[in-house]
Structures are given as C-alpha cells and as structure tokens.
Image (cartoon, rainbow, N blue to C red):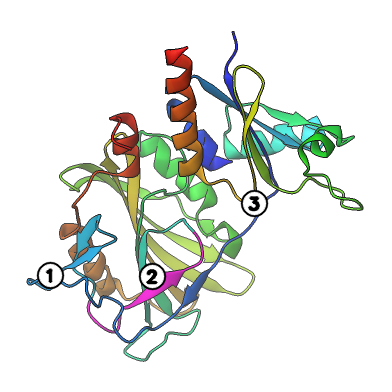
Amino acid sequence: MKYLLLIFISFLLGGCLAAEPPADPFAGMRMADGSVLWEDEYRFTPPPPPWQLLTLDEEDYSVAFFRGCRKEEPGNYPCESTLAYAEEPFGYSRDLEERQEEFFRRFLWAARVDFEKPSLKKTRALGGEALQADTVGHERVLGHKVLVRVIFAHRGERIVAFYFTQWRPADEEFDQSQLKALENFVGGFTFTAPSFYEKLVTRQD
Amino acid sequence: MEGHQRNLYLYDRFNARVAGVSRDEVSTLRHWSDQLGLSFPLLGNPTGYLGMDLGTQHKGVPMFSRRTVVIDKWGQIRYSEKGSPDYREILRLLKQLHEEEEKR
C-alpha cells in the first residue's frame, strides 16, 4: 500500500521565553467587560498587575504572563512566576492522565528539574472534564525549586493546558495565594472561534 | 518529534505516514524514540546519502540540517522546507493531497 510519506530531518532545538513589558499589550483587544479578545480566538481576563504579558519566541505557549516574587517588577529568577495557556502542551496523548505523564517528562526539561510525583485531581475547565496536576520540581544544582500546577483540558479532539509555575530558592516558602490568579484565569477563559484542528477536520480550513 | 506524534491520528486520516531520518546510529535513535515515546519509525542514515539528495547535508557538518519533506503517493516531492516543522502548514498540505488522491 502506498501512502503519502512525510519525512523530517532534525536535531533537538531548545526554546526560551523572553520578557517584554509593552505599554499596553491589549490595546484594541479589550471588551466592554474588561476581558480581552486574543488573536480572535481566545477570550480571557488577564491577571491583574504585577502580572504582565510575556512575548514568546517559541510556540509552546499561546498566551503567557509573568510576575515577580512580590510587587517588584520585573521578578528576578529564582523568584518569579508564570501563568500560561498552551494550545500544544508537551506530550501527545489525547487521554488526560496519559498526557500529564508525558508532559512532565518534558516540562522544564531545559531547567534540569526533578519533579515529585504529581498529585492528580479531576476537575472541570473549558466546559468539560479536566485534570489538575500539582507538583514541586527541584533544581538541585543551583538549589532552586518550582511549584507547578497544570490543568489539562479538552479542546475538540485535542488536549490543551493551563500552566502555573512559581520559582523560589530551595530554602524559601512558596506563595500559594498566587494560584488564585490561575484559578481566575482558567475560570474566565473561553474560545470564540473553532481551533485550527477543528476547522481542519470539518473541512473549514 | 513530539508534534508529529501528536498529529499521528490526523496523518492517519489523510492517509499519510511519517518517518524521521538522521545520521545517528540505530541504537541512538532507539533510545531517543523510547525516551520520547514515539511510535513512528526513525531511520538511521550514518553515511548521509539521503541528506545529500534532499539538500540537508552541508559540507563539513556531521549532521543533517533540519528539513521536512512531503512525498506524495506517486513519489513526487510536494513540499520541502528547512527549519522547524510548520505542523499546521504540513497538515493543510496533507489534507489537500488526500483530497487530490480521492479525486483521482
């Protein structure tokens, strides 16, 4: 049987995030209720300052925010937090539990983090069933740690994810109150258009 | 790599198959495939002749440069782009080729 054949030739490339504090990152995207229409596809309420929008030089995240440890801006590693929505989270399975296992094999890989076994909790997000994974990662060389919450949810046939990370020196306490920003962000996040993949399989693309 | 694994169900729908090629030895590729949990073939081409054919083997460089090539079922190269794969562009093309196939 003959098939189309797709060949790719590659080597591993890393990516990184770059902070950029624009004056008004949501100019022209604000709705009357204060939410933002992002890329004509996502509607959400951005987390309040000191959270700020991150400009990304990689495709792992669709939208991401960053803040420092306390009120100072910008934060300085290892005292910083990120909050993000990813259309293509690490991993490939379309099963929530399998996907979280695959995800943590890659997540923060470049930061050399060893994750504790995540605690999993069924929840709801984006109008359907979701899986919340909480863990702490340890960067043992530099003596840092990272609090992680990831919420895996469905969008059509695929799995998407919301991330929260909070870095701290190993001997400092995490600020769990910042998780509220993730909860609010996820709770107000909706899609205003079908995804690329939904259009692709319904012959709209 | 993971992007292709993530899209395998769509490749199936478009009657497409994916394979990776590098200059690594098979044992290296097997380890890498296991680590990433890949279920599609990775092909070792240590002599590099395939890269010469496809323009990814540059003089004095011990590895292929990254490139994605799509070959249709009649053996014609329909797409060849260097750099990181543009998965959406690839999927659109595979869908288009599949529709062409169905019309023939």
Q: Nearer the viewer, residue A147 or B30?
A: B30
Q: Chain of mark 1?
A: A
Question: What amino acid is at disc 2?
Answer: Thr
Q: Are marks 1 and 3 in contact (CB under 8 Å)?
A: no
The residue shown at (57%, 62%) is: A15
Where does the image place residue B91, in percent across and percent down from the top left? 46, 35
- SS assignment at label 1: loop
Is B12 on the left or on the right of A11, as rendered? left
3D distance between C-alphas at marks 2 and 3: 28 Å
Question: What amino acid is at disc 3?
Answer: Gly
The correct choice, above or below, for B35 with respect to A107 in the image is above
Q: Nearer the viewer, residue A69 or B29?
A: B29
The disc label shown at residue B83, or none? 3
3D distance between C-alphas at marks 2 and 1: 24 Å
Task: Pick the quarter of the image with the C terminus of chain A.
Answer: top left
Q: Which residues are magenta?
A: A48-58
Question: Quarter-wise, where is residue A150 in the image?
Answer: bottom left
- SS assignment at label 3: loop
Where does the image place residue A74, in percent across and percent down from the top left? 41, 87
The residue shown at (20%, 58%) is: A189
**Crowd class of label 1 (few under 14; some 14 to 19; many from 20; radius 10 Å):** few
Q: Which residue is mark 1?
A: A31
The disc label shown at residue A150, or none? none
Given this view, does label 2 or label 1 mark the residue nearer the observer?
1
The residue shown at (38%, 70%) is: A82
